[in-house]
Image (cartoon, rainbow, N blue to C red):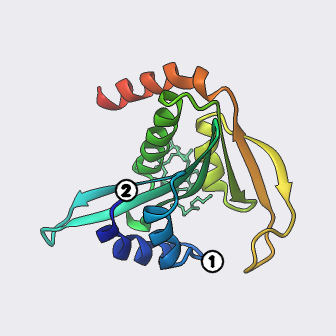
Amino acid sequence: MRRDDIDQVYALEERIFPTPWTRKSYEFELEHNPSSEQWIIEVWAEQNEWLIVAYSVCWQLGDELHVANIAVAPKFRRRGLGRRLLHHVLARAAEKGMKSATLEVRSGNLAAQALYAHFGFEVVGRRKRYYSNNREDALLMQLTHLDQQTLSFEQFRRAEQA
Ligand SMILES: CC(C)(COP(=O)(O)OP(=O)(O)OC[C@H]1O[C@@H](n2cnc3c(N)ncnc32)[C@H](O)[C@@H]1OP(=O)(O)O)[C@@H](O)C(=O)NCCC(=O)NCCS
């Protein structure tokens, strides 16, 4: 993600999340947070321009990766983009020697939970009434032994390219 991408990312963020990150928080992630890595997936659209259809923000916290945000544009869901993006950030983290990954997800967000379960994330905790808009609980999910997953990520990559 580059600074020029923030307009599109922020437009998606506002559409997708009931409590969206602010534009300033994206500027902070890009320019002032050394632990942060941000990725986008973009497609060449009919209007002859690059269109951002998925994005993620992750933080490296010691040897743990925290997936702070991940989203796919509504029209582009169920085509494997969420899986591809998550695979990318986990594989990079494993390559860098990180050992585990964590994230929080709304207890009612079954789509995201299913995506995370594909990669071996498990529920390890619950933060009661975590989300301010509807006091929904957050599930804390963790993927342990991230380093040992490298092989299966490689297999995933080969399967994707086949
Ligand atoms: C969660 C999200 C990122 C998934 O992205 P996606 O590109 O649609 O996901 P994929 O097509 O890669 O799907 C991968 C797997 O996730 C699961 N999944 C994705 N969407 C699902 C849905 N609506 N219902 C049930 N399972 C779903 C499936 O297991 C799927 O595998 P399958 O297609 O082989 O069944 C997307 O729904 C999204 O952006 N949601 C809103 C933002 C959000 O909730 N972000 C997560 C915050 S914690």
Relative to 158, residue 88 above or below? below
Residue most extreme to the left: 48
- The response on whether ligand 1 sits within 8 Å of label 1 is no
Residue 68 locus on image (x, y percent): 60, 57
Q: Amino acid at mark 2?
A: Ile
How many angstroms separate mark 1 from mark 2 (CA)?
A: 20 Å
Residue 151 locus on image (x, y percent): 50, 19
Residue 107 locus on image (x, y percent): 76, 59
Q: Which residue is mark 1?
A: 19
Lower sequence index among marks 1 and 2: 1
Which residue occupies 70% across, 55% down?
A: 104
Which residue occupies 29% across, 70% down?
A: 4
Q: Is residue 14 visible?
A: no
Which residue occupies 64% across, 40% down?
A: 62
Relative placement, left or right, of 157 versus 102 is left
Q: Which mark is residue 40?
A: 2
Q: Amino acid at mark 1?
A: Thr
Label 2 SS: strand
Q: 77 or 91, which is in the foreground? A: 91
Relative to 154, residue 127 above or below? below
Residue 106 locus on image (x, y percent): 71, 62
Which residue occupies 50% across, 31% down?
A: 96
Label 1 SS: loop
Q: 104 or 47, which is in the foreground? A: 104
Relative placement, left or right, of 84 versus 52 is right
